[in-house]
Image: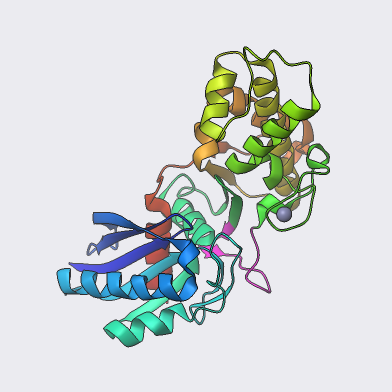
Amino acid sequence: MDSLIALDIGGTKIGWGIVEISVHSNLRISECGSIPTLAQRGGADVAQRICALVSELVSQYPHSQGVAIASAGVVDPRTGVIVSATNTMPGWGSTELADLISKNVHLTVRVLNDVHAHGLGEARLGAGRDHNSTLSIAVGTGIGGALVNNGNVYYGSHFLAGHVGHIHHHFAQGQQCSCGRSGHIEAICSGSGITTWYNARLEEEHNYDASWEGPVANGRELQERADAGAPLAKKCFVESGFALGEAIASLANSLDPAIIVLSGSMTRSGQLWWDAVRGGYDGCAMDGVANTPVVHGDLGDDAPLLGAALNFLRR
Ligand SMILES: [Zn+2]
């Protein structure tokens, strides 16, 4: 059986998996693990440890045919170069990732942006597998997406396509976004964004009940507060989900995918959030896309690894 070494390089951890390819071209992850990214040490240090990890995996799995990578940052999939990256991965931009690794292990290395890989995985092997076009949106620490049409990711002219988090919404007015602009949905709909938004509103809206509400450290804490019935926490979740639903409907109105697949930590926020997303979608979607399914992803953390493997195999 053929196999590939697959990596998913994120700001917090670097996941790896051995993807086995059966005679019918079915993909299966047989072994997996992760190491911390330690992004603050800088791009060169991260790249060096990735090379060491791949060397170790090649010696453990000597029959691997290649290295398939999903990476944070804007990626040129033709060259495997990281075009640019945000401050969550300082110095990661301009890393010639595919060349660095292939020189080290003498295997073909192919790189795709992690959100594009995630979308490709869900579209071909996950929730979108029975549809010819999938809009995949990951709502986690940040928000990213991918439009996959007939099995092909739309990259855009600058490989930037899918930056769904940087759509404007009036609820986000005045909120600073990770990209440096303000008013983008990532600032209120991502896990980190909703946390900052809630804490800021606690300061602004002094009429909250301090026995219910108080600053939170992350989206999970905020959700626990909302589930317990804290009014401002619930209001934040509902408004955040509603804004996201309206943004998704705007994308559906303009792109008309056959299915919309949501994944990431915020999608585990419970029914309150999902109902709010649905409410925002229903109010904003045009008649033709009103019944487009909006569903939860099937593949979880496997999606970017499988997507990276599909990207490797298709060329
Ligand atoms: Zn932004």
> x, y (%) of residue 17?
29, 59
Q: Please, is residue 235 above or below residue 247 in the view?
A: above
Q: Number of callouts in the render?
A: 0
Q: Please, is residue 208 above or below residue 84 in the view?
A: above
The quarter of the displayed image where residue 70 is located: bottom left
Q: Quadrant of ligand 1?
A: bottom right
Q: Between residues 21 and 93, which one lies in front from this camera angle?
A: 93
> x, y (%) of residue 283?
77, 30
Residue at the spot 48% in from the left edge and 61% down from the top edge: 117
Q: How is the image coloured?
A: rainbow
Q: Please, is residue 240 above or below residue 75 in the view?
A: above
The residue stretch that appears in magenta: 147-162
Q: Between residues 250 and 75, which one lies in front from this camera angle?
A: 75
Q: Is residue 215 magenta?
A: no
Image-based side of 209 in relation to 13, left or right? right
Q: Between residues 296 and 89, which one lies in front from this camera angle?
A: 89
Residue at the spot 26% in from the left edge and 55% down from the top edge: 32
> x, y (%) of residue 61?
17, 69
Residue at the spot 29% in from the left edge and 74% down from the top edge: 52
Residue at the spot 42% in from the left edge and 61% down from the top edge: 38
> x, y (%) of residue 51?
33, 75
Q: Please, is residue 251 above or below residue 218 in the view?
A: below
The quarter of the displayed image where residue 170 is located: top right
Q: Main secondary structure of the magenta part?
A: loop
Q: Give the position of the N terminus as an image quadrant.
A: bottom left
Residue 51 appearing in the image? yes
Q: Is residue 158 magenta?
A: yes
Image-based side of 152 in relation to 314, left or right? right
Image-based side of 107 in relation to 212, left or right? left
Q: Give the position of the C terminus as an image quadrant.
A: bottom left
Residue 314 appearing in the image? no
